[in-house]
Image: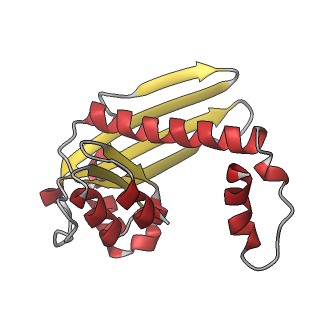
Amino acid sequence: MIPELIKILDLKGALVSIDAMGCKKSIAKSIIEQKADYVLAVKGNQGSLHEAIKSSFSKCRQSVSKNLLLNKQHGRLEARSYHVLNAKEIAADPPEWPKLKTLGMAMSYWQVKGKEPILEYRYYIISVKLDEESFGEAVRSHWAVENNLHWVLDTSLKEDNCQIYKDNNAQIGPYLGKYH
């Protein structure tokens, strides 16, 4: 579905962010062919790429960031920082991704009063040179869209109440609900 969307959307000049499901060379190539750039999340499903990026950021994980963003409200403490490296600094042989320029790491820490703290690192490949601030904006914008979209789907269209389980109807059902 992602490749079909890329072909029909006017993406020229856009920075397209996609979660790990869309971290595929063919998708990156399609985005570049549309004269756009990409920020693709990299997780364990990318195996050696994920490990190489993780290893490349090992020093960053051990130091306090100068761009740490803190937020404390409603008994919850959140801290976020963003780091970038030139893709040539990857800890292994450079992967052959279309126009790959930057590696990104987003660090998130949060603690809710009375619960164990959570520390999470997320990794990205990026086809354009970004500084830490621009990379952070791209990641936060992706999640703002994602969270707002899901809120609309869950609240307005009651997607979470869907009781369809047979065959692939669970995947098809939400699309039908959007177009009825």
The quarter of the picture where residue 171 lies is: bottom right
Q: 75 or 146, which is in the foreground?
A: 146
**Residue drawn at point x = 46 percent, y = 41 percent:** 142
Examine the rendered structure and indicate whether residue 15 appears above or below residue 5: above
Residue at x 70% of width, y 21% of height? 74
Residue at 37% across, 38% down: 138
Count all numbered tags in the image, as a single digit: 0
x and y, in percent, of residue 56 in the image: 25, 58
Direction from residue 145 to residue 129 in the image, left or right? left
| Residue 61 percent location from the top left of the image | 35, 47
- Hey, which quadrant is residue 170 in on the image? bottom right
Horizontal side of 3 relative to 37 (left or right) equals right
Above or below, 55 against 168 in this view is above
Q: Nearer the viewer, residue 167 or 139?
A: 167
Residue 134 lies, in percent from the top left, at 28, 33
Judging depth in this view, the residue of 104 and 166 nearest the camera is: 166
Q: How is the image coloured?
A: secondary structure
The furthest residue to the top: 73
Relative image position of residue 5 (x, y in whole percent): 44, 59
Looking at this view, name the residue that lies furthest to the front.
180
**Left or right side of 2 for 126:** left
Which residue is the extreme one toward the left? Answer: 88
Q: What residue is drawn where x is 80% and y is 46%? A: 158
